[in-house]
Image: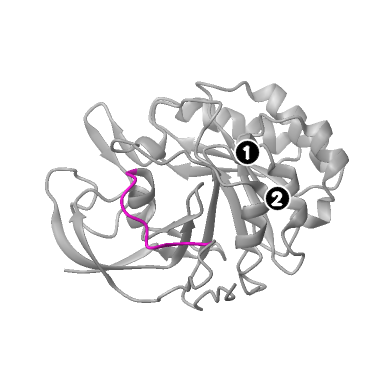
């Protein structure tokens, strides 16, 4: 199959191995609107075949995520068979068996030079307990894995997130906070580039260009997170032998129903603030 060349303008490769999750947080960004996504999963062999088409770039890792990526039955096999020239990191809630993971995965497979940990663990106070999570992270660290914890600053959980940060820092764990995106008690939270993008009150026609390769659990490629989560028509599939990335503006008829992930102002992969995943022309 034709190699997949990632444009230099791209900042992220989002690989959603599974869109199912073993937690159900009330503020999950996957369900910002309807969350009617396609839960079909391609096999581990197909994931490896598709991802190994990507032409490596030292500064751009593949991020295995979800849902919860470890719920894919071939999670460890996929991780171990992605070609070594491709950098890999993992976004996870770490509810998997860490002992099996340590036995089967070389920590150097998920370790690279970057300003943040290669395994990024989400802590959600409403659905997780901190102390067992910290124990798992410390076990992985002792076995050579690069692991950090992130907590969302949800208005109802800020005190607990800050307590967790203090606890983790004292334990030698890098704990970072993330801005809450979404609505709580009738108020919208988040810093967004485009006014009205997430209001869900209108649908406007625009031109939009992404800086991310977004691959759903079926191997389909989407223009943005909103298209992925709302199960809109994909623009290709990584198993299509002729698939290639077109670094171009595309017509969109649903501006106003954007997912916060696409339009928030955030840090890029170098942890430099001011990046937004998409560029929109009105």
- Is residue 132 or residue 87 the one in the foreground? 87
Task: Tell me the tag on residue 88.
Answer: none
Whether residue 181 is visible: yes
Q: Is residue 106 left or right of residue 50?
A: right
* Label 2 element class: helix
- Is residue 58 or residue 46 the one in the foreground? 46
Q: Residues within 10 Å of mark 1 (few under 14, many from 20)?
A: many
Quadrant for the C terminus, please. Answer: bottom left
Which residue is depicted at the point 48% across and 73% down?
Answer: 244
* Label 1 element class: loop
Q: Which residues are magenta?
A: 230-238
Q: Which residue is mark 1?
A: 72
Q: Residues within 10 Å of mark 2 (few under 14, many from 20)?
A: many
Which residue is depicted at the point 76% across and 31% down?
Answer: 136
Identify the mark nearer the N-term, 1 or 2: 1
Q: Position of residue 205 (x, y in %)?
A: 14, 62
Q: Are marks 1 and 2 in contact (CB under 8 Å)?
A: yes
Q: Which residue is mark 2?
A: 78
Which residue is depicted at the point 71% across and 30% down?
Answer: 134
Which residue is depicted at the point 51% across and 38% down?
Answer: 67
Q: Is residue 149 left or right of residue 189?
A: right
* Image mark count: 2
- Is residue 100 or residue 140 the one in the foreground? 100
Whether residue 117 is visible: no
Secondary structure mostly seen in magenta is loop
Q: Position of residue 84 (x, y in %)?
A: 77, 65
Q: State yes or no: residue 210 in magenta.
A: no
Q: Position of residue 220 (x, y in %)?
A: 45, 55
Question: Is 111 rendered above or below residue 187?
Answer: below
């Amino acid at each position: 199959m034709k190699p997949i060349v990632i444009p230099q303008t791209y900042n992220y490769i989002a690989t959603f191995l599974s869109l199912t999750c073993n937690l159900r947080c009330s503020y999950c960004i996957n369900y910002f609107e309807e969350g009617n996504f396609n839960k079909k999963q391609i096999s581990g062999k197909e994931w490896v075949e598709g991802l190994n088409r990507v032409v490596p770039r030292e500064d751009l890792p593949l991020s295995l995520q979800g849902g919860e990526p470890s719920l894919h039955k071939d999670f460890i096999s996929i991780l171990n068979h992605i070609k070594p020239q491709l950098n890999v990191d993992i976004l996870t809630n770490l509810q998997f068996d860490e002992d099996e993971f340590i036995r089967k995965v070389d920590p150097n497979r998920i370790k690279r030079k970057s300003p943040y940990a290669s395994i990024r663990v989400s802590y959600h106070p409403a659905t997780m307990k901190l102390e067992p999570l910290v124990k798992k992270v410390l076990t992985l660290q002792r076995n050579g894995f690069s692991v950090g914890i992130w907590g969302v600053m949800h208005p109802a959980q800020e005190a607990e997130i800050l307590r967790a940060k203090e606890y983790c820092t004292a334990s030698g764990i890098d704990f970072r906070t993330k801005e809450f995106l979404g609505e709580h008690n009738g108020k919208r939270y988040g810093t967004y580039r485009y006014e009205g993008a997430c209001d869900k009150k209108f649908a406007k026609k625009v031109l939009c260009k992404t800086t991310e390769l977004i691959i759903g659990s079926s191997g389909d490629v989407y223009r943005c997170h909103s298209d992925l989560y709302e199960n809109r028509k994909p623009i290709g599939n990584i198993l299509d032998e002729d698939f290639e990335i077109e670094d171009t503006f595309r017509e969109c008829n649903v501006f106003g129903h954007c997912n916060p992930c696409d339009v928030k102002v955030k840090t890029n992969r170098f942890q430099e603030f001011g990046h937004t995943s998409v560029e929109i022309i009105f």
